[in-house]
Amino acid sequence: MKGHLNKEGGTVAIDLDVISRYAGLTAIECFGIVGMGMISMKDGLTRLLKRESLTKGVEVTINDDNQINIRFHVIIAYGVSIATVADNLMNNVKYKVEQFTGMEVGRIDIFVEGVRVID
């Protein structure tokens, strides 16, 4: 399902991949986020995704009320407060995605898949 905005001149449809990429880029700008993570089904290990694979660590859905729901699978920096990083991530992504799309963000779920030491 695509997100949609009804305007005077017609309807704007926004593909989920566009929202997913924007949300992922916004997330990795947040303090304490090392990157997006993905659990490998083959060996059960968490992998840090490269910048071009950000959308694999972000799941976007649109509910029946045309609200965006986002699930992040992140790797955070060692030594930072997970609660603080999560609050920062939620607030930053909610604001920027709503400004970008013109749609309301309903829910943001964060799954911490790993911790990395940053040099």
Image (tube, helix red, strand yellow):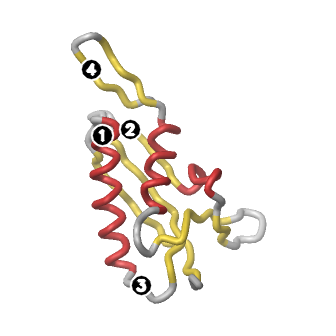
Label 1 is placed on what type of residue?
Gln
Label 4 is placed on what type of residue?
Asn
Label 3 is placed on what type of residue?
Val
Q: What residue do we see at 72% from left, 63% from top? A: 41
Q: Residues within 10 Å of mark 3 (few under 14, many from 20)?
A: few
In the displayed structure image, the side of residue 84 where residue 14 appears, left or right? right
Provide the secondary structure element on which disc 3 rests: loop
CA distance separating discs 3 and 1? 31 Å
Residue to which mark 1 is pinned: 67
Which of pointers 1 and 4 indicates the residue nearer the eye?
4
Q: Residues within 10 Å of mark 4 (few under 14, many from 20)?
A: few
Mark 2 or 1, nearer chain start: 2
- Whole-percent x, y for residue 109 in the image: 39, 60
CA distance separating discs 1 and 4? 14 Å
Mark 3 or 1, nearer chain start: 1
Residue to which mark 3 is pinned: 80
Residue to which mark 4 is pinned: 6
